[in-house]
Image (cartoon, helix red, strand yellow):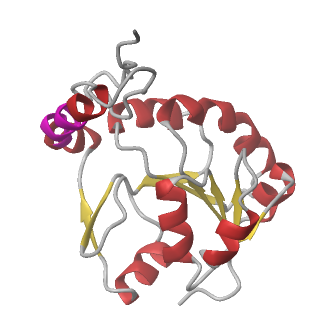
Amino acid sequence: MPGNEKMCIIGFGRMGKRAAQLFSRGFDVAVLSARNVEEEARTAGAASADDPGRAISEADFLFLAVPVEVIRLWVDQINESSREHCVVMDCCTARIAAESELSLVRRQRFGLPELHEGEIPVIGEPDKRISGYLNQQGYTLWPVTPEDYDRRGAVVGTAHFGDRSRTGPGTRAAYPVGRITGWFIPAAAD
């Protein structure tokens, strides 16, 4: 198990919380969020960070838990502030679009688009410390290409989009239609 290695999770929605719960068992986890998440982070075994530059520069691992359209907003700071050996992970489910955005990151990187019990799909070559940690926690990494992941998720993503678009006025669909292009389409407004 890793010892005293630091992980910074950027974004603290459903996936950021899940990542904090999972990785706080073996890493010193700090969370960056646009909202005050101090109590939620503590409950998940993490600390809330208030200085993005410092949290990123001290991290051995960065975990991006933000929508694909927000990744680009973090790329420059990651490239400028993170350590050269820092490993970047993300959990975007629109893999082709995510890979396009992440191609600008100048660090080792890989994707974990799902964090659930059992098999976890992995895009790219995972860091051995992370894969070893996940194996010790009872997870198995399942290598998949961005294209295959998007293809597999296209039907599921379209179904989720349909469900979300019927939830009411002003609700934004959280899933890309078809997942192939990575475009997010808002639900119809009144």
**Residue 7 in view in this figure:** no
Using residue 144 as the reference point, say whether residue 79 is left or right of it. Answer: right
Which of 86/176 is in front?
176
**Residue 119 in view in this figure:** yes
Q: Quadrant of residue 31?
A: bottom right
Please determine whether, in this image, residue 115 is positioned above or below residue 74. Answer: below
Q: Is residue 154 magenta?
A: yes
Q: Quadrant of residue 171?
A: top left
Q: Position of residue 41 (x, y in %)?
A: 67, 68
What's the residue at 23%, 53% (across, down)?
A: 144
What's the residue at 53%, 90% (across, down)?
A: 1
Q: Where is residue 167 in the image (x, y as percent from the top left)?
A: 32, 31
Magenta stretch mostly in which secondary structure? helix
Using residue 152 as the reference point, say whether residue 50 is left or right of it. Answer: right
- Quadrant position of the C terminus in the picture: top left
Please determine whether, in this image, residue 105 is positioned above or below residue 38. Answer: above
Please determine whether, in this image, residue 12 is positioned above or below residue 117. Answer: above
Q: Where is residue 45 in the image (x, y as percent from the top left)?
A: 63, 79
Q: Position of residue 58 (x, y in %)?
A: 80, 65
Which of 182/106 is in front?
182
What's the residue at 40%, 19% (across, down)?
A: 186
Using residue 169 as the reference point, say whether residue 26 is left or right of it. Answer: right
Please determine whether, in this image, residue 146 is positioned above or below residue 88. Answer: above
Q: Is residue 23 magenta?
A: no
Q: Quadrant of residue 147?
A: top left
Which of 169/89 is in front?
169
Single out the residue that lies furthest toward the top: 190
> Bounds of the magenta span?
153-160
Q: How many labels does the image show?
A: 0
